[in-house]
């Protein structure tokens, strides 16, 4: 009896996993629902193809689905006692498994936590392209949750991308210009203090 229940649960889990992969990689771009369509410059306008690649590997979509289950991006130590985080940092694996266009597709269509890691992977591999992606998501206010020690916070995707690029990709003039533009977007809101 226990084996039958386990088999049924396993079958349901596999079906959910396959359905999730279908939604992420195989639906036509017009059929996908992103968490923030308003204000988001389309990938085509930014010079990218939003069409899913036929070369998406099983390992890549398994990784994306695993990361999509994370509720937040965790630092090395979390909680009041500072226990080591069990969260896996997938940046290196995403960089190894995905092409630049696949990373852009993931950033444009995935959950906020997945966007964070895919953007870091793209920035490490192709800083110039990551700057274009940042500009195409400049109005993207979908929030990403972070947990460091016992402190949790949320940060909009555009501010997260800005801070990722600020130190190594943006010139000081660009960094100041984009900071000022983001300050205008978040004038009077909590997120203004993050800038």
Image: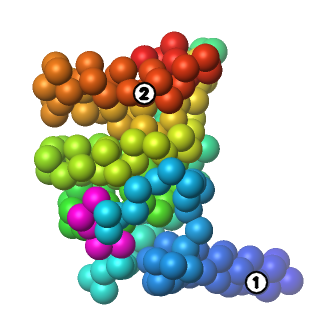
Give the label on residue 8, or none: 1
Residue in view at x 13 percent, y 25 percent? 171
Q: Tell me the element at label 2.
A: helix
Residue 1 sits in quarter: bottom right
Between residue 148 and residue 115, name the one nearer to us: 115
Residue in view at x 64 percent, y 83 percent? 15
Give the label on residue 81, or none: none
In the rendered image, the quadrant that contains the C terminus is: top left
Instruction: Decide if residue 137 is in sight here.
Output: yes
Residue in view at x 29 percent, y 73 percent? 49
Between circles 2 and 1, the one closer to the viewer is 2
Rendering coords of residue 161 (x, y %):
36, 37
Q: Is residue 89 above or below residue 20?
A: above
In the image: residue 53, left or right of residue 80: left
- Label 1: how many Cα within 10 Å (few below 14, some 14–19, many 20+): few
Q: Is residue 104 magenta?
A: no
Main SS type for the magenta part?
loop
Residue 89 sits in quarter: top left
Q: Tell me the element at label 1.
A: helix
Task: Find disc 2 in the rendering and name its residue.
Answer: 182
Residue in view at x 42 percent, y 27 percent? 182
Gap between marks 2 and 1 measured at Cα: 49 Å
Q: Is residue 49 magenta?
A: yes
Rendering coords of residue 156 (x, y %):
51, 35
Between residue 27 and residue 2, name the one nearer to us: 27
Task: Work out whether mark 2 precedes mark 1 in sequence or the reverse, and give the earlier one.
Answer: 1
In the image: residue 140, left or right of residue 43: right
Please state the extent of the stretch shown in magenta in the rendering. 46-50
Q: Residue furthest right?
A: 1
Instruction: Decide if residue 148 is in sight here.
Output: no
């Amino acid at each position: 009896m226990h084996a039958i229940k386990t088999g049924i649960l396993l079958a349901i889990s596999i079906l959910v996993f396959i359905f999730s992969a279908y939604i992420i990689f195989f639906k036509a771009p017009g059929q996908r629902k992103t968490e923030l369509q308003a204000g988001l410059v389309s990938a085509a306008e930014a010079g990218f193809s939003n069409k899913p690649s036929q070369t998406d590997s099983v390992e890549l979509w398994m990784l994306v689905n695993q990361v999509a289950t994370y509720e937040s991006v965790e630092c090395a130590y979390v909680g009041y006692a500072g226990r080591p985080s069990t969260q896996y940092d997938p940046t290196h694996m995403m960089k190894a498994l995905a092409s630049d266009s696949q990373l852009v597709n993931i950033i444009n269509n995935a959950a906020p936590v997945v966007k964070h890691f895919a953007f870091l992977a793209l920035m490490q591999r192709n800083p110039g392209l990551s700057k274009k992606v940042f500009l195409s998501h400049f109005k993207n206010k979908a929030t990403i949750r972070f947990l460091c020690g016992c402190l949790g916070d949320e940060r909009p995707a555009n501010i997260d991308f800005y801070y990722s690029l600020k130190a190594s990709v943006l010139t000081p003039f660009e960094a100041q210009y984009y900071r000022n533009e983001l300050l205008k977007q978040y004038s009077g809101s909590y997120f203004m203090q993050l800038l």
